[in-house]
Image: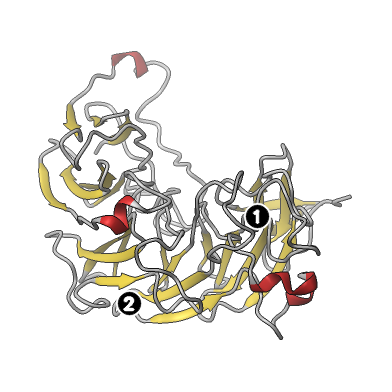
Amino acid sequence: MAKVLRTVASVALLYSLCLIPAVDAQSSQANGEWPTYGGDLASRRYMPLDQINADNFNKLSIAWRFKTDSLGPRPEFKFESTPLMVRGVVYTTAGSRRDVVALDAATGEMLWMHTENEGARGSDAPRQLSGHGVAYWTDGKQERILYVTPGYRLIALDARTGIPVPSFGVGGVVDLKKDDDQNIDLITGEVGLHSTPVVARNVVIVGAAHLTGGVPKSRKNVKGYVRGFDVRTGKRLWIFHTIPLPNEYGNDTWLKESWAYTGNTGVWGQISVDENLGLVYLPVELPTGDYFGGDRPGRGLFGESLVAVDLQTGKRRWHYQLVHHGLWDMDIPCAPILADITINGKLVKAVAQPTKQAFLYVFNRETGEPIWPIV
């Protein structure tokens, strides 16, 4: 098959000598596919394939190129999508309106394209352009592609045709600015997402992102809650309040009722899942804003925390706050990495969280206990 390479304005595939590395969920690596953003739900981004090596790398050549300049009202200038490859088809977002395209992996032929013109809602969105890509789901019979638009809507497409799935949400669309346990203006509400949804055990998990928090307009903002949806119907299954409500765990870490008006604290990076343990790992960002915390006294859970929640219910199982009352934009920039490691001769299910701090935090992913002491 083919391995996807990225350029500013095009998607190029090297066909003659390479394979797309992949795993099925967290196990099979035999078919050479890349079915999720991180390669697998553990976000390991690695495949032990050896068709490309040091001896033949200099012989690689471009087999085909797909230009994305004409997708959207203007050319894309910040192409960040990581294409998926499943069953010989490449799926990716592309263009300044975040269109979705399906391409034949062998020839580059466009099989279908889906576009959404969201008007003012899209042009006012805090997270625009092509984003990071799509998610793929199948039950062995149906195949679906799911993605979040710039205007913060979750869309399910038939992976074979690109047509919205009518039984999902309303005509294939779930409006993510609704049913979020807060009031959000449908046009100007400052919330969106660049990252892809994550699908595990028929649950679609969607995070939230905002404008950069360096110079917030106010101490108030939309809260970046995380939700799980049924992949077949689009029904909301659960919500995790990254800023806890009264009587929820962690609310007492917000002094002077600062929880009520503070926003952000979303999960703008990729999310990892251990399907066997039934746990979702959420890398949560700072509250409003990045460089001043005088309006939000207290430790402010779950800001700058790695949180493990139940895949089916969204209930907190454990958390670790990496920075208490963060002030220097040290939020978590990427997906946690799940790996089984050997400690003193014993196999441990671990989760490793890279950070902007040059620290790698490593925990037992079942219990949240640090693998090594954290001072």
| Residue 101 left/right relative to 153 | left
In this picture, is 76 found above or below 255? above
**Quadrant in which residue 321 is drawn:** bottom right
- Depth check: 194 or 28 in front? 194
The disc label shown at residue 71, or none: none
At which x and y percent is residue 256?
Answer: 79, 72
Whether residues under marks 1 and 2 lie with C-beta atoms below 8 angstroms apart, the answer is no
Query: Farthest residue in the right direction?
Result: 375
In this picture, is 168 found above or below 327? below
Residue at mark 1: 286
Decide if residue 139 is in sight here: no
Disc 1 to disc 2, C-alpha distance? 28 Å
Image quarter where the N terminus lies is top left
At which x and y percent is residue 342?
Answer: 72, 51
At which x and y percent is residue 34?
Answer: 35, 48
Amino acid type indicated by mark 1 = Leu
Decide if residue 137 is in sight here: yes
Q: What residue is drawn where x is 40% and y is 31%? A: 50
Amino acid type indicated by mark 2 = Gly
- Mark 1 residue crowding within 10 angstroms, few (<14) / some (14–19) / many (20+): many
- Depth check: 225 or 36 in front? 225
Number of marks: 2
In this picture, is 249 found above or below 345? below
Between circles 1 and 2, the one closer to the viewer is 1
Residue at mark 2: 234
